[in-house]
Image (cartoon, coloured by chain):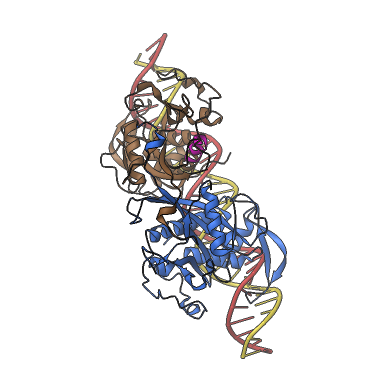
Chain colours: A blue, B brown, C yellow, D red
Amino acid sequence: MSPYDPSAYPPFAVTVDLVVLTVRRHALCTLIVKRGEAPFQGRWALPGGFVREGEDLGAAAARELVEETGLRAHDPGDPPPVPGNGAHLEQLATYGAPDRDPRMRVVSVAHLALAPDLPAPRAGGDANSARWATVGELLGEDGPVGDEEAMGEGSDREGGLGGGAEPLAFDHAQILADGVERARSKIEYSSLATAFCPPEFTVGELRRVYEAVWGVALDPRNFHRKVTGTPGFLVPAGGTTTRQGGRPAQLFRAGGATLLNPPMLRPEV
Amino acid sequence: MSPYDPSAYPPFAVTVDLVVLTVRRHALCTLIVKRGEAPFQGRWALPGGFVREGEDLGAAAARELVEETGLRAHDPGDPPPVPGNGAHLEQLATYGAPDRDPRMRVVSVAHLALAPDLPAPRAGGDANSARWATVGELLGEDGPVGDEEAMGEGSDREGGLGGGAEPLAFDHAQILADGVERARSKIEYSSLATAFCPPEFTVGELRRVYEAVWGVALDPRNFHRKVTGTPGFLVPAGGTTTRQGGRPAQLFRAGGATLLNPPMLRPEV
DNA sequence: CGTGTTTATCGTCAGGGAGACGACTATGAT
DNA sequence: ATCATAGTCGTCTCCCTGACGATAAACACG
């Protein structure tokens, strides 16, 4: 074993990159920023930055999240201090291929953030250098369930990247794919899908989160039976809402349970 | 966003640490090494070392694994080139608290390795500075299923660490706990438990792997029905063996399936 | 050589969860 | 008034699971 010699280690730079996921207009979206410097100048990339001296990895990710979105992160397990204006944040994986940054050796600790629908991205002062993009256009997946008609009428559709978009900078497409896969599997066996919802939400809104993340259609009746029958998943908030149209729906809050047993079942194929 | 200035980044050292798990005598065990240098000199720790210049993170972990155990790693997904003398290796998580190493800023990318039962640990030339320890004694868990009588008669029981062992160096107890939890959950929905088995194994041997990792007793009949009925999990190898005593058991090889659907169900408490 | 022990393997049965789908309710839009 | 939309409650069947009986095939004894 090589001796542990602190004076003879190769130096690395350590960064954090963020996969910030949200559900907008029935589609799973992620936050991307336009790079201002080389390499990959002008290309879209995941938000991120260097870990500072004396700064913990999770703290660096939380700091970047605030800088990019204004969202405060809360650790998994803790109840959100003010539910709704916080995001779930967890470590995703670490990427350190020797040539992933052409200038120097950089190891990036990617984090995954799940947030409710946000009004608009705010880059640090620079407004139109950050935007929400559907993961479908970035990863070349098929459009989730249809619903193409609901797209293409918003106010933030000027960033280029139409159909087969230009790939993300660095290895960020891989990081994004890993983050999406983590989210897709984690909402199966945990109550994490509520992180995509506002503090109070209806069963239908939660179902549309599952449908957007998984890209499938779920039976409203079976879904309703399942989530309301899983102890600790949802607690009634007391009111009703008609913001989705149709019959008023009961409002719920996320319950204390974090692990769902039995899990939600993702329809196969 | 802070400008991406490669000349003004704080320097880090990057290491890989290994959680090498195996099943020995019906108990989940992990490989630990005795530290030769400060800090934590003389204490037990997870094996690991610095990532070299130009070396990928996974390659560094694979190199450490060979140095410590002689096992060659194969990526998940790939079939083992020579099944049985390889180990499953995957990235676990990254630990980078500012004060986790008292001398300098070190970020450690922990990896998880699952290996079949090995004859004896071989440290790099130094024989008795590495040993297998049950995760129970390291993490203070209750002994798995009983079976205490089967312990305490082996040939490698001289390394100290009797009951409430001295804790591992650094944050390695946390890393180990995370690795064990990853293994425990991952054998639920993947065929990864076969990584603990020799190339050909019986249903009973596979069941004892589950029992050791989960620390529970499973019904042999239901287990047999479940694993032989899951398509792609096991393929018959053609022969039988009586190495476990009793009636000869059919030999199987790991099938091509990596994800089990429906998953194995871990009995709840 | 029988008997007991151990392990493997096949069957049976009851209960629960999930998919498929019918029916009814309560709102807004036309 | 009628329709469209969304929510909520039930029902029915299938399949999986857990519990457990029964048989089979080896070895270890006396």
The residue sitting at 48% across, 29% down in the picture is B39
Residue B170: in sight, yes or no?
A: yes
The residue sitting at 43% across, 71% down in the picture is A143
Say if B126 sits above or below A124 in the image. Answer: above
Which of the pair B20/A252 is nearer the observer?
Answer: B20
- Where is residue D9, by image quadrant? bottom right
**Residue B174 placement (x, y as % from top left):** 52, 38
Q: Main secondary structure of the magenta part?
A: helix
**Residue B189 placement (x, y as % from top left):** 45, 48
Side (left or right) of A97 relative to A239: left
**Residue B126 placement (x, y as % from top left):** 35, 23
Which of the pair B58/A41 is nearer the observer?
Answer: A41
Q: Report the span colored magenta.
A: B170-179
Say if A231 sits above or below B212 in the image. Answer: below
Which of the pair A130/A261 is nearer the observer?
Answer: A130
> Is B22 in the magenta?
no
Q: Quadrant of the C terminus of chain A?
A: bottom left
Say if B131 sits above or below A257 in the image. Answer: above
The residue sitting at 62% across, 54% down in the picture is A230
Q: Quadrant of the N terminus of chain A?
A: top left
Residue B216: in sight, yes or no?
A: no
In this view, which residue lies farthest toward the right?
Answer: A238
**Residue B180 placement (x, y as % from top left):** 48, 38
